[in-house]
Image (tube, grey):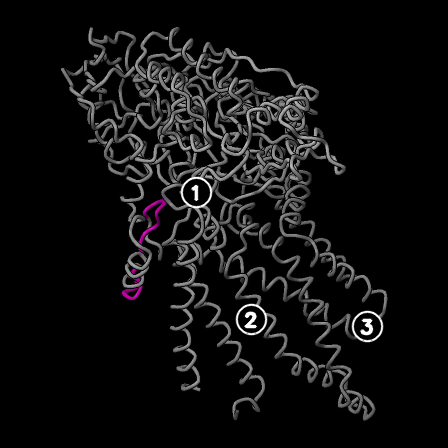
Amino acid sequence: MKKTLSILVVLCLLLSVFAGCSSGGNGGSSEPKWLKMAVSFMYPSLDVHKDYNGWYTSIYGISETLFRVDDDMSIKPLLATENYIVSDDGLTWTFELADAKFSNGNPVTAEMVVRNLQRLAEVNERFAYLKEFTLIAADDKYFSITTKDIYPTLLTDLTSPEMGIMDLDATEDFDNAPVCTGPFVVKSMVPEETVEVERNTAYWNGDVKLEGATFIYLADDEAKLNAMQAGDVYAYNSVTAAAKAIYEADPKTYNLTVIPATRLQFYVLNKNNLSDNVRAAINLTVDNDKIAEYLGGTVSAAVGPFNPAAPYGQVTKPAVDTVKAKELIEADGYTMGDDGFYQKDGKTLEVRIHYYKARSLDSIAVLMQEQLQDIGIKATPIAVEDADSTYAATGDYDIALYCMIADKAGDPYFAINSLFREASRWAKAGFANDECEALINELEFETDVAKRAELANRIVQMVIDDNAFGFVGLFNKTTVTSHGVTGVAENCPFDFYGIDADTDMN
Amino acid sequence: MGKYIGKRMIHLVWIMFAVSFLTFLLMYLSPGDAAMKKLYAQGVEVSEEVLEATRKSMGLDRPFLVQYGDWALKALRFDLGTSFRDNTPVSAKILKGLRYTSVLTLSSLILSLLISLPLALITALKKDTLLDDIVRFFSFIGNSLPNFLISVLLMYFLCVKAKLLPVVADKSFRGLIMPCTALSIPLTGRFIRQFRAEILEQLSKPFITGAQTRGVKKRYILGNVLHNSAIPILTIVGLSVGTLLGGSVVIETIFRWPGLGKMAMDAITYRDYPVIQGFVLFTSTVYVVINLVTDISYRIVDPRLREQ
């Protein structure tokens, strides 16, 4: 009995020690304003120019670019001013710099900006095209970029987070402690575990509300949910449908923000394997609203590749109509077989839906299978581990599901160029249209924003009308916060923004 | 003994060559490469030119045998190369992962043995009693539960509900409690069942019945039973150590424990060939050495084997 009692006492003591040590803090008013945020991805380096590190240094509030994209997708000046001039021939852009300073107090000079762009071109293959531009620093405040051809998306490019500006002379350790201009500076970094940032006391663009923030790499969705519920983190985005339902049930503790974002789920219909009528029937059958409903509010049903609120997202598509879909198939000579599937010449109408298991494409493949089978098209989902090196590269599919960022920074050209060009990898599916190619060429060099939107709408409408693609959904950006956290880019559709000077906790 | 160890070491060289070659070949043949993974990481489309230029800069455009030969020659000089992902030397990555995996492995193993050995012995001695049924039931449940479920349940009850431990733990003792417990639960369940079966087998041997009828004291009988069960138990433990040292991907990912399993999984995801190759060399060496150590321990435990 004595033994049992003493064991119980020891256990109680141990529990009380653990309880005493548990964090569980909720950021009371006397505590410093220090945000703890979970992130689903973390690069092992903070070198702004390499790989996609710049996305994360931007999220951490460390680096800033010459221009930024606002929540309404408009481009706003940041390290540069709005006083940029484009030469009459449209080739030379002259930029004026704002009175920005690095965290060490050094001013941001035109020469440093030019050197940054040159370094980016050297260390990041995706920006090697910058080598073809002529970059000249006129004096401390002004620099120019001269392109070989008219380049209307230059401002969009300059918002890319990889174009963040570092003090190349003062930075001793690019991987762990880049010297930048953002409202926060690196305090500590454990690669692929945590990044701690603290207030940049010399921030050039106003007062910084937070004292600092810790970004915690949590890849597992359940771990993020548990960490949020335990009070170990106060915010994260990419909330799953299951976690969203839990947060929605407790609105006093959690604040959920859901906005349509820029990641597009779409499918390509292979014209080489599927007739015009069958492709049209498929597009008349796939019910994006039902798919979005099934995915629990994590996506918004799409019409085209872009946010319908954007000026270049003004396209239409026919409503779901399975009766008409069946008529189209039957007009192609198919008759309904005893097994419930259409047949022609003894052959069942069958399509293969290729997909990879990410971004809910697996669910979409199964939902599409169900919907197509309901009207008599036998559909077989085929999963691959890596789409880029298999069906996307070879063109061997009937229907290819894919997910990509369609809108990089408030301009339609990137997605249109990637998807609908004759040289695009998706062109293997047979979509080639001289008129469309001519319009894309026009879009490439068009400088008027309204005209660009009009061209983009015409191109996308052409693709929709040809039933070459099906645009299923646009991923919503779903952010959950607690502890009165605001300003973690929850209203911004882009993935590469996070905390800034206005991020706060109450 | 020395000759025996030398022979096994020669086998190790062949095993390492075969395993590294096969792994390299499989990676080469599998769809996707490090350049693709790097460029498409954030869902941004890139042109074919950019992809080719990146492949070239990473040396992935060279023929298979050239790539393997280059790697193998460096490996012979104990240079495992650098990670495609973060340019860290592979050996440094493995050492870091090994440090954390060893701590997790050892602590889980000790905890599991401390619980399972006495329970296996008691349940074997009290076979078919209520206690035996209860322990067997829970060991069956523990053994059946998948790691991720155990981890999530532990997190929910200990961190979210009881708030005894943080979900986001550091690498201190407190941070070790959850992954160690999550790893120990199925291990303990398995050990109890396997150890119990071994002990029961020994208890049913005629010499035990003879000893019991002769009135030999129970503790002497138990000593003999444990001694005779030692070889199969050592085999079970040895094999478990080998598996555990390979890392537990699920537990390491959920609890952010930067061990070898997570490192290997990340390397496979990003097609980080140098890291995968380094990991394969390391694990094959560990398996051979653990098996060797287990075989040597047999010879220590059972003197009859030394003469074979």
Identify residue for label 1: A389
Depth check, mark 3 against mark 2: the one in front is 2
Residue A367 as seen in the image, left or right of residue A493: right
Helix, strand or loop under label 3:
loop
Residue drawn at point x = 19 percent, y = 17 percent: A146
Identify residue for label 2: B238
Percent x, y for residue A237?
Answer: 53, 28
Which mark identifies residue B126? 3
The amino acid sitting under disc 2 is Gly
The amino acid sitting under disc 1 is Ser
Residue A99 as seen in the image, left or right of residue B111: left
Q: Which chain is indicated by disc 3?
A: B
Helix, strand or loop under label 1:
loop
Look at the image and give the residue range highlighted in magenta.
Answer: B75-87
Residue furthest front in the image: A345
Which mark identifies residue B213? none
Residue drawn at point x = 59 percent, y = 32 percent: A228
Q: CA distance from mark 1 to mark 3?
A: 59 Å
Q: CA distance from mark 3 to mark 2?
A: 27 Å
Q: Tell me if residue B6 is in the magenta stretch.
A: no
Q: Is residue A504 visible?
A: no
Percent x, y for residue A20?
Answer: 61, 41
Dominant SS of magenta comes to: loop
Indicate the quadrant containing the N terminus of chain B: top left, top right, bottom left or bottom right: bottom left
The amino acid sitting under disc 3 is Lys
Q: A317 or B244: which is nearer to us?
A: A317
Percent x, y for residue B129?
Answer: 85, 68
Q: Using the rendered view, name the quadrant where residue B138 is placed.
A: bottom right
